[in-house]
Amino acid sequence: MAEKITIDGHCHCGTIAITAQVDPDMVMACHCTDCQTIGGGPYRAVAVSDVADFQITGTPSEYIKVAESGNRRIQAFCGHCGTQLYACDENRQRFNIRTGFLNQSAMLVPKKHIFASSALHWITDIEHTPCFDKGPESAQSQLKQ
Ligand SMILES: [Zn+2]
Ligand SMILES: [Zn+2]
């Protein structure tokens, strides 16, 4: 277990802010089809925090996702702007915080990829596809390492 780091971020509209302590060795990316559907993207990455290390301001909206196994998970998001914030158990003890809205997202490198059986084949090949600094009219650039 690595030393915990403090992470923070807020949703796109600023209504909800989260600060937490997470173990950077516990970051993972999930490629399951539920993450693809709910996330609206190819996969979702999370950093894990226990309730004692988790602070939130604002009240997120919640959706209960029932897995094939019957496992129930709260999916929390901003009801105004739709930013996805975290998933947790129904007792709210352990939070899988989505890394996309965190200020430290570049530091939170996934240490494992789960549900790789449903990962989209092209995600490992983006370095061979044209990349642009900003929009498609901007300069072409290399992906940052
Ligand atoms: Zn928001
Ligand atoms: Zn998933």
Image: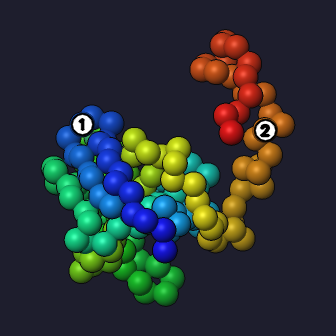
In the figure, is residue 62 to the left or right of 36? left
- Residue bearing the label numbered 1: 14
Q: Give, as a three-letter code, the residue at label 1.
A: Gly
Task: Report if residue 3 is visible in the image.
Answer: yes
Q: Give, as a three-letter code, the residue at label 2.
A: Glu
Give the x, y percent position of residue 37.
52, 57
Instruction: Give the farthest residue toward the left.
Output: 58
Above or below residue 70? Residue 115 is above
User: Label 2's element?
Assistant: helix
Above or below residue 49? Residue 89 is below
Circle 2/circle 1 CB separation < 8 Å: no
Task: Report if residue 96 is visible in the image.
Answer: no
Above or below residue 74? Residue 70 is below
Give the x, y percent position of residue 104.
44, 45
- Mark seen at residue 127: 2
Is the residue indicated by label 1 positioned so its CB lies within 8 Å of ligand 1?
Answer: yes
Please give the name of the residue rendered at 51% of the width and 53% of the height, measured from the top-left corner. 108
Display colour scheme: rainbow
**Cα separation between marks 2 and 1:** 33 Å
Give the x, y percent position of residue 80.
24, 41
